Amino acid sequence: MRVLITNDDGVASDGLWALAKRVVDAGHEVIVAAPTTDMTGMGGAVGGDLHGGELHARRIVRDELGKTRCWAVEGPPALCVIMTQLGAFGDPVSVVASGVNPGLNCGRSALHSGTVGAALTAANNGAHGIAVSLDVTDASMQWPTAIHLVPELIERLAAVNKGRRVINLNAPNLPLTDIKGVEVTGLAKWGDAAGELSPKGDGLWSFERKPGDPNRRIAGTDNAAIREGFISVSELVGIRTQQSDLNLKDIVF
């Protein structure tokens, strides 16, 4: 299977290279194309000049990945996916694995995640997408826990005959031996982090991330599963329409 590895934290992130090594070691053909700099919170933004301008990427070498071709792209992760699927780095891929993001992407706030945005962009461009995120705690980052299931998910997605799937995987920051299992979950109504703005005057605010409210964790959702020690796997659906009940027949032009 030909797999793109990308992220939204940029090529300096340890999680990116842990994920790439895991997929390479599983025997897949890997391309790494990730942002040159931190693009956290970009969602599905493309950036770049797609109206006749130039897009820039430079080759980088990672000895632990052998002959795997790696690129630093001047743009967000969704652009990395689009460039890959348009042939910038060789043949298009069948799967995009995005991450590992240091920080959960649970609940509907995952909409804003560049990690998840890359996976959604994959499905919109002919590939399955897997977004991988790991909780941040006072302990060291347990990358092996976050990446453990990725090869298995790639194999299962390869067996899907119709459509393109998007998987959002969130893992507790625990050693793999302490993980209780895997739960297929829904999205929580809220994420598992909150923010607080403090005005500083003259159009300036400071922003501080805070833990989410434990009372908002509902059984069967992603953020609840994480707090119970499970790896959460949610299957996302991209942009779609619903039957509208808006009556617009009286609008006159």
Image (cartoon, helix red, strand yellow):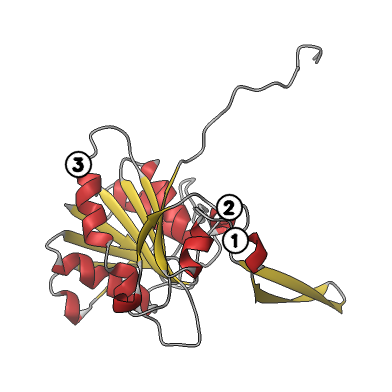
Q: Position of residue 118 (x, y in %)?
A: 42, 54
* Res. 127 in view: yes
Residue lying at the far bottom in this picture: please name it.
139
Spatial distance from mark 3 to mark 2, Cα to Cα?
Answer: 28 Å
Check disc 1 and report the residue beneath it: 217
Q: Quadrant of the C terminus?
A: top right
Q: Amino acid at mark 3?
A: Ala
* Image position of 63 with respect to 158: above or below: below
Q: Residues within 10 Å of mark 1 (few under 14, many from 20)?
A: many
Q: Amino acid at mark 2?
A: Arg
Q: Residues at badges 1 and 2 in contact (C-beta under 8 Å)?
A: no
* Res. 17 in view: no
Which quadrant of the figure has residue 174?
bottom left
Q: Which mark is residue 159?
A: 3
Q: Amino acid at mark 1?
A: Arg
**Element under disc 1:** loop
* Image position of 164 with respect to 179: above or below: above
Check disc 2 and report the residue beneath it: 108
**Element under disc 2:** helix
